[in-house]
Image (tube, helix red, strand yellow):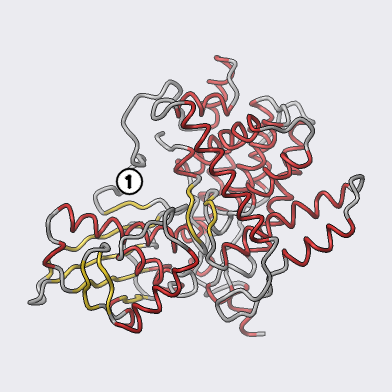
Amino acid sequence: MTISAFDLFKIGIGPSSSHTGGPMTAAHLFTELLRTEALLPEVQRVQVDLFGSLGVTGHGHGTVKAVLLGLEGEQPHLVDPTSADARVAAIGEQHSLKLADEQHIAFDPETDVLLHRGQRLDYHTNGMRFSAYSSSGEVMRTREYFSVGGGFVLDEDQIGSETVDLPQTPMPHPFDTADQLLEICRSTGLSFSDVILANELSWRSEEEVRAGLLEIWSVMQDTIRRGTTTGGILPGGLSVRRRAERQRELLEKADDPTDRLGTMEWVTLFALAVNEENAAGGRVVTAPTNGAAGIIPAVLKYYVDFVPGADEDGVVRFLLAATAVGALFKKNASISGAEVGCQGEVGSACAMAAGALAEVLGGTPEQVENAAEIGIEHNLGLTCDPVGGLVQIPCIERNAVGAMKAITAARMAVRGDGQHHVSLDIAIKTMRDTGADMMDKYKETARGGLALNVVEC
């Protein structure tokens, strides 16, 4: 399994890793393909076709905006969220964009980005097709891409590939299942985080791993700070009020260090803050997706702020242990709401956070695996039914509840002996099977559940 911590935790912008980050990356990859094949100077027009879930919720999830920025050469981890809307508005007004940040071409988002609401490409519901045309109208190059969750993007030649842009260096501790990971831990005496660190060293130095993970944590903290100091109404037309700033003010006035329920209210606040920032199109870390981006930061901040003895080494170990769990979901099921419903997003994030917290609380590998299993087991069947196609209702509150579940799961597990009836592998397989059985209208289409009934009411 060649999935790194830096694949599961990506710095980008909201509101969706699969519907914003992935399409931006795909558009950027297409411009780089044109550059590599020396076609860029001859391109006069580009057409983008969005299929499946991308076609249904493309505007609500910011997909069209992301594609335009990607065509102009932007990447999710580098784009400036504060200027993004103005740039996209200018493209619409001027009917022109700067392809790959090199040459201006005529481009009208209304006619050159087509949303196919009733069609999907065979491999995955989040499919895109990019086509470049010459001045004579001839198709010079076309390419299909798939945003498969968490910002991961595959092109048409990578379908079915497990590799995620990493050198093919042998890892010391390869594993495909939780049972295999546990056996590695038993035979070597390593923890989940130790195993992942040893594997990460196949691709980068320990100093690079540590610095990169602490940078990710820094971005998570910045997102929490912005979310707890910004009020107003979220964009998109639902008139959802941002609540984190007001809740922070109330908690600061009533803060009582001995109030354990108050601690839980802070955790709730942290998750709300992150997902309000995500819904506003701000900078967040996919963890492992944007729709579930608030759970791991909230639980990690719980560890840092409320667990005695917490330190930077614990932060690094937390993110590495979370990677071990997240890689199992990515390998054996899915982290895409469009593929398996929100159990693949909030469910996997809850399991990752639970396992990671269990490890930094001193849990054994068996207790860490148990915590992760509890985290996903009690999210099985969770649908993805965003009202209006926006990552707001029920997504923001769902992250707060998911963070609380993760803490509960971790504390239950570390007070047990690691023995339990349902293994993490079985729970992940069940999540995959449940997703396959789930009706498509409950998979990020805004055509079922709350998305339908809220409108009707």
Question: Horizontal and vertical percent for residue 296?
Answer: 63, 47
Question: Horizontal and vertical percent for residue 104?
Answer: 22, 72
Q: Is residue 453 left or right of residue 121?
A: right
Please identify the quadrant where the C terminus is shown: bottom right
Q: Residue pushed farthest left? A: 136
The total of numbered circles placed on residues is: 1
Please identify the quadrant where the N terminus is shown: top left
Report helix, strand or loop for mark 1.
loop
Residue at x-position 53% and y-position 20%: 184
Question: Horizontal and vertical percent for residue 67?
Answer: 35, 67
Query: According to the image, label 1 marks what residue?
Result: 160
Q: Is residue 262 above or below residue 62?
A: above
Report the amino acid beneath label 1.
Gly
Question: Horizontal and vertical percent for residue 54?
Answer: 41, 68
Q: Is residue 155 left or right of residue 1?
A: left
Q: Closer to the camera, 368 or 65?
A: 65
Q: Closer to the camera, 448 or 35?
A: 35
Residue at x-position 26% and y-position 62%: 100
| Disc 1: CA contacts within 10 A as few (<14), some (14-19) or many (>=20) | few
Q: Closer to the camera, 425 or 45?
A: 45
Q: Is residue 162 above or below residue 182?
A: below
